[in-house]
Amino acid sequence: MRFDSLVDSVGNTPLVGLPTLSPSPDVRLWAKLEDHNPTGSIKDRAALAMVEQAEADGLLTPGCTILEPTSGNTGISLAMVASLRGYKLICVMPENTSEERRQLLRMWGADIISSSGVGGSNEAVRVAKGLAAEHPDWVMLYQYGNPANAGAHYRGTAPEILADLPTITHFVAGLGTTGTLMGAGRFFRENKPEVRIVAAEPRYGELVYGLRNLDEGFVPELYDESLIDSRFSVGPRDAVRRVRELINAEGIFAGVSTGAILHAALAQAARCVDAGERADIAFVVADGGWKYLSTGAYEGTLDEAEDRLEGQIWA
Amino acid sequence: MAIDVRIPTILRPYTGGERSVDGNGSTVSAVIEDLEGRFAGIRERLVDEAGGVRRFVNIYVNDEDIRFTGGLDTSVADDSTIVILPAVAGG
């Protein structure tokens, strides 16, 4: 495959079967390998789409500064796109994210403003909104409320999967900004409404939920409950267990959040087996494991990995 | 055997600092009523005026969000775990 430039190669990722982890020939699991994108995560789709939309709307002009709250992958994707198009990028990132993410951001030329780990990404969003108000010339693309984020999956991720797997019955992805699930959910509602949309939400340690009050809670503006059918909360122990199964059984080296997504996909698969239903369950491999080696998720016992992930934003 | 209810940091002032309390009832709603009897005020933090789960609160029965399983009418079994969490951002 030949492309004019790196950003032109975003998307059109492989969909691979999981012959070992699939419970039966009638209930099959399929992995959408989003780590095959240029910076190694599904966020390349959203970042590129948001920048292109902002350029089309005249919001982004040469030399502009982009500001974004991110726990990592969106920032890394934006940094790559921004560096190629001549924008400066400032990321607001919680302090309890992996060191690899910081190094990658700096490598692609982004500046990082650390926000408190208490409150997790909620706090990063709050700090970024404050900075945006102080610097009206900065452009905050704001992945949590930008329709171009969901649009990237409506136009790319979901139709690619349907083309490769016309018999799809379930789509499973992680719930963070909600962009993947909202875009893919809307696409399947319109084009194959019998497909069930399943969300896997990472459950972090207590630090991340240590808000001052419940009104500081956060639901992304993009989120529309009617576009999903079930939502699972997955803790670090199950996420780590599944991410290890994925590499042991299928050879796929994925990031920790993908373990959470696989956990929800396997729960769905078990329900289909119990109900005697045929199923083709497609799930998202959001990124590879490289950026999380320092978290200790891939070594030692599950107890040790769980302890190490306590307090970290691992998805 | 009672239902294990996990309380987030922010609501522990109601439970005397306990991070996990026992609850009784056959639905989430009944368990919340049961908790209210011992930890007065907690119901109002979970349930809004319209009788639904508050916007920035998520309640899970055996790791599944009850908004997709029947809301507060979601049934619970004696060996169920209920997790209450504030809504947080990802990404």
Image (tube, grey):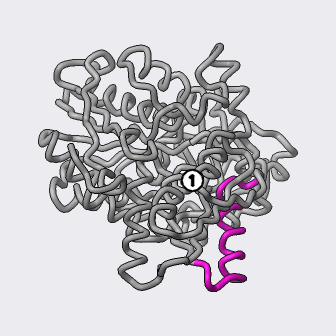
Give the residue displayed 54% in from the left and 77% down from the top. A63
The crowding category of the residue bearing disc 1, from other C-alpha atoms within 10 Å (few below 14, some 14 to 19, many at least 20), is some
Quarter of image, res A268: top left
Is A275 placed above or below A165 here? above
- Highlighted magenta segment, given as a residue range: A118-138
Q: Amino acid at mark 1?
A: Trp
Reading the image, the residue beneath label 1 is A108
Kindly identify the residue that appears in the image at 64 percent across and 65 percent down.
A90
Is the C terminus of chain A in the top left, top right, bottom left or bottom right quadrant?
A: top right
The correct choice, above or below, for A88 with respect to A38 in the image is: below
- The secondary element bearing badge 1 is classed as loop
Q: Picture coordinates of residue B9 (x, y %)? A: 78, 48
From the image, give the main secondary structure of the stretch colored magenta: helix
Q: Is residue A137 magenta?
A: yes
Residue at x 33% of width, y 52% of height = A10
Q: Position of residue B6 (x, y in %)?
A: 69, 40
Return the x and y of residue A229 as percentages of the image width and height: 35, 50
Of residue B14 and residue A77, the one placed in the foreground of this image is: A77
| A87 relative position to A114: left or right | left
Side of B77 where A300 appears, left or right: right
Q: Chain of mark 1?
A: A
| Quadrant of the rendering where the N terminus of chain A is positioned | top left
Residue A122 shows up from this direction = no
Q: Nearer the viewer, residue A15 or A257?
A: A15
Q: Is residue A76 left or right of residue A225?
A: right
In reply to whether residue B59 is colored magenta, the answer given is no
